[in-house]
Amino acid sequence: MVKCRYCGGTGLIMKGNKAVRCSCIKEKLLENAYNQSGLTPLMRDYTFDNFDFKYYSSEKIDKVKGISYAQTAQITFKAAKEFVEKFLQDKHTEGLLFTGPVGSGKTFLACAIANEVIKNGKQVLFVVVPDLLDKIKSTYDNQDRELTEQNVIEAAREVPLLILDDLGVHNYTEWTKNKLYSIINYRLNYQLPTIITTNLSVAELSEHLGERTASRLFQMCKFYRLLVDNNIRYIKRLERK
């Protein structure tokens, strides 16, 4: 393990006659926050500065709102940045729900929020919904007493900012609906913000998640759309060739 050249691993440096915290401590705290956040190394590059509006057409029109895809992206981007500002001031601010097709930038924007919040010293948990449900199921056959269903659910319930990615068209059994309801209802009752990405339309939310959960999402989140001509991930892959 390489020790800090300034503090030698003690975490303190001398300034005059006073011992102060070394800058390496802040770096370690930031790294720990990322390790606990659920963000992958790739997602650390999903920042507001790296969000590219060129993938959103100024010619195509969102038939629901009557504005261009580019305008919709600008409105959604602004809402994401404003959320960060509000959350840093008030941990009980209203959450966001991003809708749109696969590859429209929903996850990118959710991660941009997460990265900005983490850099400002706040705790975030990013989970992909199918992975979260699989993790809960895995605890039933797990002999590790430290990883229990209660621990997994409580982590999602109680974290200051939760990001539920890919709340899409999955096999929503009654068990699935109840687990999601448990998390979302708790966060609503305790006014803890949640960022959600989904390829479901507003009308489909009730159909797939049930009225109880959908009504709580309407209460706790502002809804925004991202629309594209083509999957941005696919376009970027072509650009790299």
Image: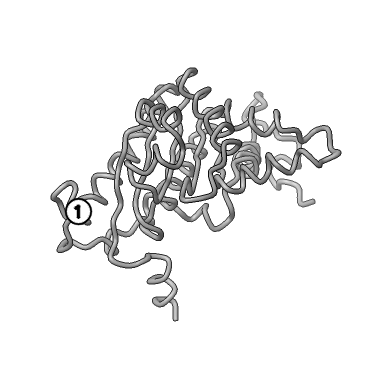
Local packing at callout 1 (Cα closer than 10 Å; few below 14, some 14-19, many 20+) is some
Residue extending farthest to the right is: 143
Number of marks present in the image shown: 1
Q: Is 212 left or right of 155, judged from the image as shown?
A: left
**Residue at x-position 48% and y-position 42%:** 114
Nearer to me, 161 or 115: 161
**Residue at x-position 28% and y-position 58%:** 53
Image coordinates of residue 230 in percent, x first then y, are: 33, 67
Image coordinates of residue 86 in percent, x first then y, are: 36, 28
Q: Quadrant of the C terminus?
A: bottom left
- Pointer 1: what residue? 62
Amino acid carrying mark 1 in the image: Asp
Q: Is 22 left or right of 79, judged from the image as shown?
A: right
**Residue at x-position 37% and y-position 65%:** 232
**Residue at x-position 37% and y-position 27%:** 94
Quarter occupied by residue 82: top left
Quarter occupied by residue 57: bottom left
- Determine whether 124 is above or below 197 in the image: above
Residue extending farthest to the bottom is: 241
